[in-house]
Image (tube, rainbow, N blue to C red):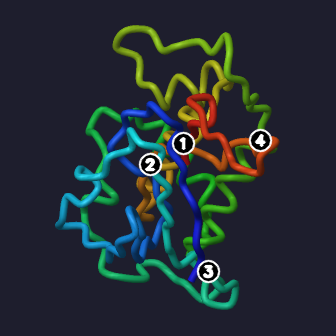
C-alpha cells in the first residue's frame, strides 16, 4: 500500500481530488474513508480551509512473465473497449494490421505500435500543431499527413490502432506528478495535464 498527501492552498475552492489508479481509501478532516465508486464522497470535501488529504492506493504491478504469455483473445472483451466509429479510414486499419503482422501477443503488438511512432519520423511538439481540416479524420490526419503532434495525437492514434486489431484500449486524460517546490511539495498545474 502506498500513500500520497494532497494539500489544497488557502483559498482554493475545488471539491475534487485527483487520485491514482487502484485507490483504496483516504483520510480527510481526521476521518478515514474507504473508496467506493458508488458514493459521491469527494463532492462533500471542503478545500477552502487548507486541508490535507492522505490518499492510499495499490500501485499496479505488471509482471513481464505474465505479459509475455498473453495470446489473443486473452479474455472476454467488453465490446465497448474495442468500439470504433464507422468513419475511421481504411488506411488507419491497414496500418494497424501491417504493424501487428503475425504477432499474437497483445503486449508485443502494443510495443510494436509504440516503436512505430518512435522510428517513423513522428515529431512530438506542443505548439504549431496543425489541426485537421473540417471533415478530416483526426487520427488519419496525424498518421498520414502532419506526423507532428502532442500527447493527444499520439495517445488517440495508439488507442484507435490497438482497437482496430482487437486489443481493448482506453484513452485517459490526467496529470503527471508536477514539480517539487522548495518546501518539498509537488505543484500540479494545468501544464502538467497529459493523456495516455
Per the model, the C-alpha gap separating discs 4 and 1 is: 24 Å
Q: Are marks 3 and 4 in contact (CB under 8 Å)?
A: no
| Residue on which disc 1 sits | 195
Q: Position of residue 38 (x, y in %)?
A: 17, 67
Nearest to the eye among marks 2 and 4: give it: 4
Q: In this figure, which residue is indicated by the disc labeled 2?
A: 171
Can you tell which of label 3 and label 4 is closer to the viewer? 4
Residue beneath the point at 42% across and 70% down: 26
x and y, in percent, of residue 136 in the image: 41, 17
Instruction: Name the secondary structure under disc 1.
Output: strand
Q: Secondary structure at mark 2?
A: loop
Q: Quadrant of residue 179?
A: top right
Q: Earlier in the sequence, mark 4 or mark 1?
A: 4
Work out how far the residue at label 2 is from the one at label 1, CA to CA, in angstroms: 7 Å
- Evaluate if marks 4 and 1 touch, with contact meaning CB atoms under 8 Å apart: no
Can you identify the residue that label 3 sits on?
62
* Pointers 2 and 1 in contact (C-beta within 8 Å): yes
How far is disc 1 from disc 3 in space, using C-alphas? 20 Å
Contact check, label 2 and label 4, Cβ < 8 Å: no
Q: Is residue 128 left or right of residue 184?
A: left
> Of marks 3 and 2, which one's residue comes earlier in the chain?
3
Which tag, 3 or 4, sits closer to the chain's start?
3
SS label for mark 4? loop
Q: Which residue sits at x=42%, y=37%?
A: 90
- Between residues 13 and 29, which one lies in front from this camera angle? 29
C-alpha gap between disc 3 and disc 4:
31 Å
Q: Quadrant of the N terminus?
A: bottom right
Amino acid at each position: 500500500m502506498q500513500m500520497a498527501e494532497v494539500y489544497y492552498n488557502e483559498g482554493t475552492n475545488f471539491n475534487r481530488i485527483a487520485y491514482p489508479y487502484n485507490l483504496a481509501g483516504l483520510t480527510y478532516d481526521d476521518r478515514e474513508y474507504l473508496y467506493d465508486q458508488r458514493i459521491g464522497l469527494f463532492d462533500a470535501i471542503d478545500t477552502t480551509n487548507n486541508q490535507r488529504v492522505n490518499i492510499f492506493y495499490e500501485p499496479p504491478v505488471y509482471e513481464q512473465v505474465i505479459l509475455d504469455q498473453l495470446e489473443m483473445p486473452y479474455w472476454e472483451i467488453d465490446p465497448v473497449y474495442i468500439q470504433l466509429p464507422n468513419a475511421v479510414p481504411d488506411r488507419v486499419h491497414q496500418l494497424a494490421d501491417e504493424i501487428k503482422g503475425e504477432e499474437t501477443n497483445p503486449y508485443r503488438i502494443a510495443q510494436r505500435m509504440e516503436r512505430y511512432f518512435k522510428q517513423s519520423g513522428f515529431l512530438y511538439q506542443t505548439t504549431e500543431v496543425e489541426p485537421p481540416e473540417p471533415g478530416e479524420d483526426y487520427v488519419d490526419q496525424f498518421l498520414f499527413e502532419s506526423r507532428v503532434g502532442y500527447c493527444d495525437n499520439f495517445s488517440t492514434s495508439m488507442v484507435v490502432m490497438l482497437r482496430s486489431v482487437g486489443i481493448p484500449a482506453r484513452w485517459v486524460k490526467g496529470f503527471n506528478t508536477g514539480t517539487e517546490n522548495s518546501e518539498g511539495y509537488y505543484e500540479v498545474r494545468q501544464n502538467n495535464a497529459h493523456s495516455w
